[in-house]
Amino acid sequence: FDTAPTGHTIKLLQLPPILEAGIEKLQSWSTTIYSYWETFKGAFASTEEGTRLTAKTKQEITEKLQKYKAGIQRVGQMLTDSLRTRFVVVCIAEYLSVSETKRLLQDLVTCNVAASHVIVNQLVTADAHLTDKEMAKIEKWANTPGMSESMKVVATKARNACRLTSSRRAIQTKYLTELQTAPQVQEANLTIVQVPLLPEEVTGPTAIGNFSKLLTSPDFNQTKANEATAPPAAKMPRVLYDKASTTTSGADASSAPAEPAAANPLASKVEALLEDPEIQALIEQGGPKAQNAIEDLKANPMNVMTYMADPELQPLVQAAMKKLF
């Protein structure tokens, strides 16, 4: 799921242990609270009735506190379970964003939350960058004598656009390198995913589908920390949302020996879930639409967010999520 800005996200990650500590404190104060409650109830009810109500109230409060504590513990365990939860950080290659990203990665380590990727968005590509010699040619062309007024306007705009993109790329390269060499990235063996600045707005299914290929395509631009220096537990999937793909650095991928695919715990849970009678009944009730959704989710589980907003499929999605987690 998408999280709030950095500060709010860190507070969210720190919330389970804080709430758990608060509930434990309430439980330790229960004797004092109950004695106040008995005094209060004794003023309005007979001794027998007051005792009965107090015992019932004690039990209800104790059960609710235990229920809340168990729920908070489940949330905390889910956030720190690297098999079910991993953090994908998105930033841009500028000073403030990179600094905030490095702080966030450090806080994630403190909270025992696994991170796997950093997506650097809106990067000016190499084909939009001019070298000093190329820029000098543009300057010379823009100042060519005898150029018509209309052509001068075009030349000036082209020169300014080239200056802008080249300057932005130089700035972005500086901070992208700083991020790639940061200890927070190197020590966690994170993958840096470089997403280019696009000429069009990413809205609508087609544009979003095309944009997703920048994250899932096997030849998208990515770099990662030295795999050999990372402990085995830190070697998480390198390609976003692609359980079958792997990437290599340095040598040609074709020369690297194939490694057996790691077992996916979630996949086995999904297969078992499809055998559940309640889930099968909801799929049958949903008809072809539900069956098509199941096939789509088998291929790409991340599409579950699409179906959660569909009123016809909500009962199926909610039941499945409840049984899975």
Image: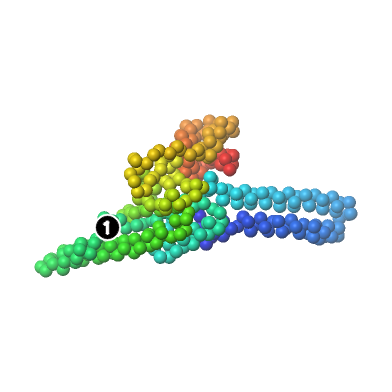
Residue occupying the point 60% across, 49% down: 77
Residue highlighted by disc 1: 128
Tell me: 16 left or right of 42: left
Position in image of residue 37 (x %, y %): 81, 58
**Among the 4 quarters of the image, the one containing residue 135:** bottom left
Of 148 and 16, the residue lying toward us: 16
Residue drawn where x is 38% and y is 46% of the image: 248
Picture layout, residue 150 above or below residue 230: below
Residue 324's place in the image compared with 113, above or below, is: above
Report the residue at 37% width, 41% height from top.
Answer: 256
Tell me the element at label 1. Answer: helix
The answer, for residue 293, to whether it is visible in the render is no
Instruction: Residue 159: give x, y in percent of width and height.
Output: 22, 64
Three-letter code, disc 1: Ala
- Extreme left residue here? 146
Extreme-right residue of the structure: 47
State which quadrant residue 129 falls in.
bottom left
The residue closer to the viewer here, 1 or 98, is: 98
Does 102 sit above or below residue 243? below
Q: Residue at x 44, y 56 (%)?
A: 186
Label total for image: 1
Image coordinates for residue 166, horizontal then vertical, percent: 28, 62
| Image coords of residue 84 (percent x, y) | 54, 45
Q: Is residue 96 left or right of residue 83?
A: left
For the question of whether residue 246 can be seen, the reply is yes
Label 1 CA crowd tier, 10 Å (few <14, some 14–19, many 20+): few
